[in-house]
Amino acid sequence: TYQNNTGSEECLKCGAGTYQPESEQSACLPCSTGTYQNNTGSEECLKCGAGTYQPESEQSACLPCSTGTYQNNTGAEECLECPMNFTTISSGSTTCLGEIHQHTYYTIVDSFGANIYIVSVLRLGMGYHI
């Protein structure tokens, strides 16, 4: 908590994205990059979990790594690109998958010709993933 009005006896809770570990302070501190705080009145910020990152300070949440990137450490400011011919299946990954041998897109039209589906098929070193 903090107090920014001289003479006031009421302390205020720090907002999301900020913290204050000490009492009788006049301001809250912003969470640094790679950390977040989604609660109010906190005494510390939390590290972003593996598979997530936060490039900005004073944030209330971390962002998932996008497909094709990963992060296996906590407290990250950015995600890492998968090596050439490797990928991730979804966002928020902590590792890249085996080598891509083939990436094919198929267009499927239903029996009435109304709905079109695009299916992405990855042929990885360890099998197929749709």
Image (spheres, grey):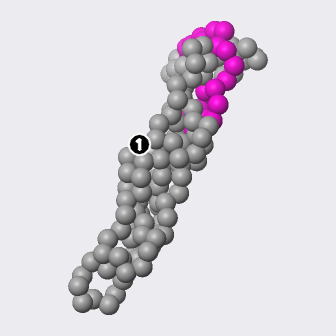
User: What residue appears at the point 53 percent right and 57 percent down from the top-left corner?
Assistant: 46
Residue 15 can be seen, yes or no: yes
The residue labelled by disc 1 is 55
Position of 105 with respect to 8 (left or right) is right
What's drawn in magenta, residue-wise? 88-109
Could you tell me residue 73's position as x and y percent?
60, 41
> Which residue is more in the foreground, 84 or 25?
25
Is 106 within the magenta? yes
Left or right? Give the position of 78 relative to 15: right
8 falls in the magenta region: no
Q: Nearer the viewer, residue 13 or 89?
A: 13
Q: What's the amino acid at mark 1?
A: Pro
Please give the name of the residue rendered at 61% of the width and 18% of the height, measured from the top-left corner.
86
Establish if 83 lies above or below 51: above
Q: Residue furthest left?
A: 6
Measured from the top left, where is residue 49 in percent x and y? 58, 47
Image quadrant for the C terminus?
top right
Residue beneath the point at 69% across and 19% down = 98
Task: Please state which of residues 111 and 101 is positioned toward the viewer in this rendering.
Answer: 101
* Residue 98 sits above or below residue 47 on the image: above
